[in-house]
Image (cartoon, rainbow, N blue to C red):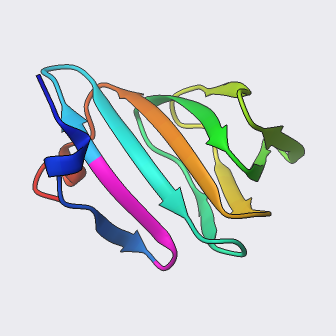
């Protein structure tokens, strides 16, 4: 069992504060993102599902812009280039498989 209140959050990139829970093959990231904060274009081997719990988040994937709002979810396949910007203050949940090794000590 995990208690998010007891997990320390870390600013991974400017404006993106994450709390991470890891399993053998999965990482769940709970993000608080400040309005206007952006994550540059990148890709990774991990499949990713991005769920917007609160706010509006712009995701660009395959040169297509997706404006994601509260309670919307999008899947990002392995090795697909993507980037994003918080249009408002956001709470996001990412699920990655396999687990994100670089986030294990965060």
**Residue 82 coordinates in the image, percent (x, y):** 66, 49
Give the camera-side residue of 52 and 67: 52
Q: Residue at x 80, y 63 (%)?
A: 87
Relative vertical location of residue 7 with respect to residue 38 in this rendering, above or below: above
Query: Which region is colored magenta?
Result: 14-19
Q: Residue at x 60, y 32 (%)?
A: 51
**Which of the 4 image quadrants contains residue 66?**
top right
In the image, is 16 to the left or to the right of 52?
Answer: left
**Which of the 4 image quadrants contains residue 100?**
top left
Q: Residue at x 63, y 55 (%)?
A: 90
In the image, is 53 to the left or to the right of 31?
Answer: right
**Residue 9 coordinates in the image, percent (x, y):** 27, 62
Is residue 16 covered in magenta? yes
Q: Residue at x 71, y 27 (%)?
A: 71
**Residue 38 coordinates in the image, percent (x, y):** 64, 70
**Which of the 4 image quadrants contains residue 67?**
top right
Give the camera-side residue of 98 and 95: 95
**Residue 68 coordinates in the image, percent (x, y):** 80, 40
In the image, is 1 to the left or to the right of 29?
Answer: left
For the C terminus, the quadrant is bottom left
For the N terminus, the quadrant is top left
Residue furthest bottom in the image: 14
Is residue 94 covered in magenta? no
Number of callouts: 0
Q: Main secondary structure of the magenta part?
A: strand
């Amino acid at each position: 069992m995990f208690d998010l209140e007891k997990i320390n959050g870390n600013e991974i990139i400017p404006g993106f504060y994450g709390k991470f829970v890891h399993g053998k093959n999965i990482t769940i990231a709970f993000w608080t993102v400040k309005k206007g904060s952006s994550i540059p274009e990148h890709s990774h081997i991990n499949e990713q599902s991005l769920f917007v719990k609160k706010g509006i988040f712009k995701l660009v994937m395959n040169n297509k812009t997706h404006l994601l709002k509260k309670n919307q979810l999008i899947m990002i396949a392995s090795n697909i280039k993507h980037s994003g910007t918080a249009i408002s203050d956001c709470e996001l949940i990412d699920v990655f498989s396999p687990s994100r090794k670089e986030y294990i000590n965060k």
